Image (cartoon, rainbow, N blue to C red):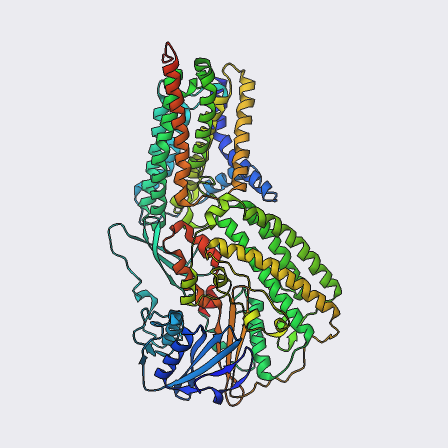
Amino acid sequence: MKWIKTQNNKVLDLNDIPLLDLRNLRQEIILESKEGKRVIGFFGAKEASLIRLYVILADDKNSCLLISSAIISKINSYPSITNEIPAFHAFEREFFEEFGVESSDHPWLKPVRYSQNRFDKTQKIENYPFFKMEGEDVHEVAVGPIHAGVIEPGHFRFMCNGENVYHLEIQLGYQHKNIEDLFLQKNKPLMHLAESIAGDTVIGHSIAYCNAVEALMNIQISERAELIRAVALEMERIAVHIGDLGAISNDIAYLMGNSIFGATRTLVINTLLEICGSRYGRGLVREGGVAFDIDENLSDRISKMLDTILKSVKIIGETLFSSSSVLSRLEKTGVLSKETALEIGLAGMSARASGISIDIRTNHPWGEYKNRNTEIITMKTGDVYARAYIRYMEIMQSAEIIRDLLKKLSVCKDNQLLSAFQHKLKSNSIVVSMTEGWRGEVVHTVLTDESGNISKYKIKDPSFNNWYGLALAVRDNGISNFPLINKSFNLSYCGNDL
Amino acid sequence: MIEYILNIAIISVYPFLFIGIINKIKAFWGGREGASVFQPLYDFIKLLKKGEVISSTTSFIFNITPSLNLAAVLFAGLFVPLINQKAIISFEGDFILFAYILALSRFFSIISAMDTGSSFEGMGASREVSFSTLVEPAFFITIASIAALSGVNSFQNLSLILQNTGETGYLIIILSIVVIFMMILVEGCRVPVDDPNTHLELTMVHEVMILDNSGPDLALINYANSLKMILFSSLIANLMIPAGATLLNASICFTGIVLFLAILIGTIESGTARYRMTRLFEFIFLMSSVSLLILALTMIAIYESPVGVIK
């Protein structure tokens, strides 16, 4: 057996994972990827003194996941997969950085983060040879890592000819906090860690964490808790999407959009505050369920809030997307074609804007989403307009979902919020937990050892796939359009730096 | 005499209020209360009290530019009639000196931006140069046509256009107002040409050139920039106010027109997005085309008139 089939949140025994020869595994990966499977995990875990490489591919059509592995011993290089399947490039770079196992003919084996827990500590970002362009009329513009405004650190190096960008090289890793290893600590409140992986996807990451450990503890959470989690996830999506539309308006100096979307976003996050006491949803999702209830009264207030925000989002959205001066800025800016997006393995909302139909809520549903059929919204053009308009449509869709969830909540007889559980994880197991955060698929993979402790915690935020998409989207655009294109992706720095 | 005093008062106060009103209008359209209209003045005073940080890579050019910039704009301001169509200094062909004094100030702000050695500021300087080379012809074609047709040879006589040219004059005045208004947007670095509120260095034109300036220098630059907008606004005002108005009427009209322009600019900034950098040239070419229209009208008027109107 070359692959083992599993599903989102399904626990497997580690001994059941096929163990192949590395070259064999490489052939298998290339074969499966050419049949349309997507890589969502490619990471190593220390096993005794050896390194075991795990590969997880997602089969979106059949809602299943394929897992396989290889033991790496006595070799420090293998022929790269990236050359055949470019979507692997970031994964292979990460694997190389962590364990020093080189994929020999990788076109761009640059460390992802220059982190302190890397294999070769002598390599420093100071000595890294950035891409260079030669020529009389070429110039470089370096931006960051410290930026104007309150945003996270990242270094951007543009190679320009006048206003035109030939290539953008992005260097991240300035926020690396080694969060994956922090998950290996015993008797620590890991829930809080999960909430802090990326500040803008609190709910998305905490649900992914909870689903994983709940599967490992083999507990079923109550229907009510599932509903409340889904409400929170959709509210997070609405809040961030509205905020992004405001930020996009701000970048093109469309004042009205900025102020009205900004004010509307506040309504949404203030409602989250009413539910759980935090505007970003911290403290709501807990192992075994949720910590706060949505009663009749609160449910009414949420519906009222939805009415208000939908009204203003519709009015200003229609004005925004019909204003010629706005459209002239958004259309054909930062185009990422479907072919490129597929090739580099773009994830989530940005991928849907380029016409790729993936949404974990539909393709690999969990919890409440198993009971519903979420329509996947896609656009065709893959430009800033598509990424802005898809947000507008997803706000509407999420509002509908919340209304439906609230209806279900009102007839839900089950009043239990937190299920009782024993904090004992199934030993020697692996579970892959995926959720659809507002930016796209959030993947948490958890491995446990013989005594039931977490031995490897692997996180993949959609930003990890999409940063390279941003670099490609900027090519052949004016450098003055970069902030707008960047905002249309709105990627997380700490979700990538981990 | 009283006109001179009023003119000096306008030069020193109106620029702040002009920006203050634009910001207030933008706040209004954004559904916010907004800062007081005197806020730019408070900011100016605050900046004057501050210290300065000067990059060690800069030379004396960077140090003298803000003062030189303001001096040039103030000097140019002497030729522009403000209240009651009276400029402080006026002579034949003063508009040529006006244009080139402003060009001098621009030249220094550009080389001062290059002086800092920052890749951002070089980028801003290159944008500024490309725009101003296109704006200059539009200004001269407009002014030269007016001069040729109406015999108006200095800013002070702008109001004589109607008197000298009759009906064609109305058309020319309307078109000139369009050209000069677009010039305010370009020279004042307002939306849709530039975004004065942005924090994104890569998209800036004017703002990015002054990234390294701080404290009193920044205060002078901001003041000079808003003064430039007032000067162009007063050109519009003087095209509209008929000759022979009393001092009181002229003052009220002048203030009213400037106020209206501030409100108009604020409203435009609220309702439109900024143009794409490459499309800005279309905007500036539009300005040049309107000025060519003025030239064409002038030609027609001159050749149709039996005696010729050139004096």
In the image, residue A255 lies at what x, y percent?
A: 54, 45
Picture layout, residue B90 above or below residue B198: above
How many numbered marks, from 0 up? Answer: 0
**Residue under the point 37% across and 71% down:** A85
In the image, residue A47 lies at what x, y percent?
A: 42, 87
For residue A35, say whether it is visible.
yes
In the image, residue A337 lies at what x, y percent?
A: 42, 59
For residue B89, say whether it is visible.
no
Residue nearer the viewer, B255 or A96: A96
Image quadrant of residue A134?
bottom left
Picture layout, residue A180 above or below residue B238: below
Residue nearer the viewer, A347 or B76: A347
Quarter of the image that includes the N terminus of chain A: bottom left
Residue nearer the viewer, A171 or B83: A171
Question: Among all residues in the image, which is located at the extreme top?
Answer: B307
Residue nearer the viewer, A161 or A111: A161
**Residue under the point 61% across and 60% down:** A397
**Residue under the point 49% across and 24% down:** B237
In the image, residue B242 lies at what x, y percent?
A: 51, 17
